[in-house]
Image (spheres, helix red, strand yellow):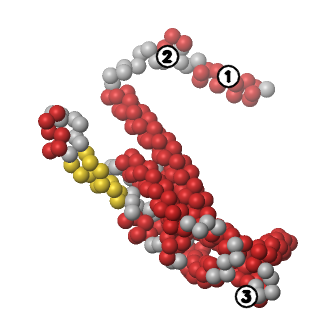
Amino acid sequence: MSGKEGSGGFRKRKHDNFPHNQRRDGKDVNSSSPVMLAFKLFQQELDARHDKYERLVKLSRDITVESKRTIFLLHRITSAPDMEEILTESEIKLDGVRQKILQVAQELSGEDMHQFHRAITTGLQEYVEAVSFQHFIKTRSLISMDEINKQLIFTTEDSGKENKTPSSDAQDKQLVTWSLKVTPVDYLLGVADLTGELMRMCINSVGNGDIDTPFEVSQFLRQVYDGFSFIGNTGPYEVSKKLYTLKQSLAKVENACYALKVRGSEIPKHMLADVFSVKTEMIEQEEGIS
């Protein structure tokens, strides 16, 4: 009992060492002291960084939405006869996405991109997926990271609004170059997501009686899978995590090619999609059991 009283009494005596009339209530703080001025500067810097981060998150969300809409538009190519019109429309949409990326580049001017990478990585991955999907439809090949970054160099006019007289409009305008580079991780994750869209493209092609696209997609996905296999567990965690999904997409495409090669001549084209969907469900069930 004496130990408890001693413990409690010690806390009470320690607390009472500061009389109530001498406790700091904030009124006696000197707001002009160097320490307070330094902390005010820290507060302003942190608030500005937080606001910039939130603006980048919103821009990344807009980039993601517009990139997804472009991908949905490109999926119409397998069923629409006007392929060139859809590609032209998709290019217009991607130009709009690049204008959003230009705003990101302006926000990151003079900043360390890696401090804000988490805010924009989702949008950049979706943009890589959309651009690489469009490039594959055009050329049946994979777009490189350098080609993507070349499209993210922007030139704008700086009219010099500050200290400008009305008569010097044309003379004060200067060209300003902005750029934003997609990181290797963003590129790899975007290409990994591309494989899922190519698998859907293959399914749509089979349903429309197109027997050439599935074999082209299968060969391309096999090359992509081999490339990711070389990375293995040495790459970023997100890349190795998406390798399983990539393998599933490849298996579904190869299954479609098998159905076309072995039974394509005996099954009407309008029924190929039904046969393929049944085989896909069987594969998924077997993978779930194992």
Tell me whether circle 1 and circle 2 mark residues in contact (CB < 8 Å): no
First of labels 1, 2 by sequence position: 1
First of labels 1, 3 by sequence position: 1
> 47 and 86: which one is in front?
86
Q: Position of residue 275 (x, y in %)?
A: 81, 76
Secondary element at image label 2: loop
First of labels 2, 3 by sequence position: 2
Q: Position of residue 106 (x, y in %)?
A: 36, 48
In the rendered view, would you say 56 is above or below 2? below
Closer to us: mark 1 or mark 2? 2
Q: Position of residue 142 (x, y in %)?
A: 50, 75
Does residue 290 appear in the picture of this structure? Answer: no
Q: For the point 63% across and 82% down, which residue is it?
A: 212
Q: Residues within 10 Å of mark 2 (few under 14, many from 20)?
A: few
Secondary element at image label 1: helix
Residue at mark 1? 9
Q: Position of residue 223 (x, y in %)?
A: 57, 82
Closer to us: mark 2 or mark 3? 3
> Residue most toward the front?
81
Total labels drawn: 3
Amino acid type, mark 1: Gly
Amino acid type, mark 2: Asp
Numbered tag placed on residue 25 in the rendering:
2
**For this view, does 176 lie left or right of residue 79?**
left
Tell me whether circle 1 and circle 3 mark residues in contact (CB < 8 Å): no
Residue at mark 3? 261
